[in-house]
Image (tube, rainbow, N blue to C red):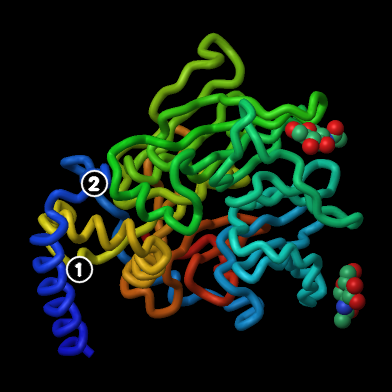
Amino acid sequence: MALITFSRIVIVCVVAVALQLIFSSSPYPIYLENPPPSSLLPAPPSNSKLQDVIKLGEGLLKQPEDVAVDKNGVLYTVTRDGSVQRLHRNGTWENWWQTHSPSLLGITTTAAGDLIVCDANQGLLKVSEEGVKVISSHVDSAKIRFADDVIESSDGTLYFSDASSKFGFDSWTLDLLETEPNGRLLKYDPSTNTTSLVLHSLAFANGVALSANQDYLVVCETWKYRCLKYWLEGDKKGETEIFVDRLPARPDNINLAPDGSFWIALLESTPVWPRFVYKLAAFKYLARAFPKMFSNWVIKIVDKSMVVNVGSDGKIIRGFDDPTGKVMKFVTSAVEFEGHLYFGSLYNDFVGKLPLPLSST
Ligand SMILES: *[C@@H]1O[C@H](CO)[C@@H](O)[C@H](O)[C@H]1NC(C)=O
Ligand SMILES: *[C@@H]1O[C@H](CO)[C@@H](O)[C@H](O)[C@H]1NC(C)=O
């Protein structure tokens, strides 16, 4: 294996050098990958707890990126083959609706009993017993290209992230190669059926969560290893500040825990080649020419998984990981419900379930 990997790297390097010579005046304005901040917060000690998960719906669920549980304890997820699936209390999976969309991402349940789904390509979908319908697809007359995660506030407003206004889901890794923050936080007001801009210039706007009393909202900026706090109430209403900075890896989805803290899934990878590779024009050209292949490759190399529990003060309390990705790879969300954590992933074919509290850490 190691030898094959090594020879592959050698071949890629040789090809890259050759293409570098050809494309060194590449017309594409692709910049450097965002470098991580100079010092990251220490990761909680590795405990491999994500290797102990119970696998729910194994084989049924293709890349279940996000998980949500409604007040009756029904667990929902959406999968890469476009289905909206739910697990009833009695342990039965139901393939609830088929959307035929390859780009379903973050979900949330609503007070009215519906499920709201971010379809990166189409916008916000409302899923109910009546069926599936698009409720928000444009902002300021422009198409939303990368709806990513959503939360409903108590007044019915849906806050959601648009990871990148420049690149779509199939080429999300190209956003990583740029230093431009193309992400936004949007809101959909059901009373007026309008979508408006809340925050712009976010470095890949990803997970969105509301605080326990809904006085602020947290939105994660994946490429900047941080999550921002946006005040919805009080003296600082409308202001933005840092909620947690210098996370040990790049944050994906964030979810409020019953005790008022948050669970954040972090995307980690073992660097497979040195940083100078990112500076090669040929590398950028190849990534640009084959974005889907490049994105799939990145999904394969994000091998470790980690989720952290962050207090409302922005401090890391504890974390669980799979240091080798043996059982859970590319974990993208962690949801706490009735003493258990549920994990979504862009790689696995099941939802992971882990009992809390756990003795270690
Ligand atoms: C489980 O619950 C669902 C929803 O109430 C129901 O449709 C299904 O028939 C039940 N399955 C079993 C095996 O009881
Ligand atoms: C909401 O607005 C969109 C256009 O932004 C429109 O397509 C849709 O029909 C409207 N829905 C309702 C219920 O008015």
Q: Nearer the viewer, mark 1 or mark 2?
A: 2
- Image side of residue 224 versus residue 97, left or right: left
For this rendering, which residue is in front, 270 or 284?
284
Q: Quadrant of residue 280?
A: bottom left
For this rendering, which residue is in front, 350 or 294?
294
Total marks shown come to: 2
On residue 174, the disc is none
Residues tagged 1 and 2 counted as in contact (Cβ below 8 A): no
- Image side of residue 199 versus residue 57, left or right: left
- Image height of 251 relative to 154, above or below: below
- Image side of residue 217 versus residue 99, left or right: left
**Residue designated by label 2:** 27
Q: Is mark 2 within 8 Å of ligand 2?
A: no
**Which element is circle 1 on?**
loop
**Which element is circle 2 on?**
loop
Image quadrant holding the N terminus, namely bottom left
**Residue designated by label 1:** 272
C-alpha gap between disc 1 and disc 2: 27 Å
Amino acid type, mark 1: Val
Amino acid type, mark 2: Pro
Question: What residue is shown at x 47% (from left), y 27% (from top)?
Answer: 200
Q: Quadrant of residue 194?
A: top right
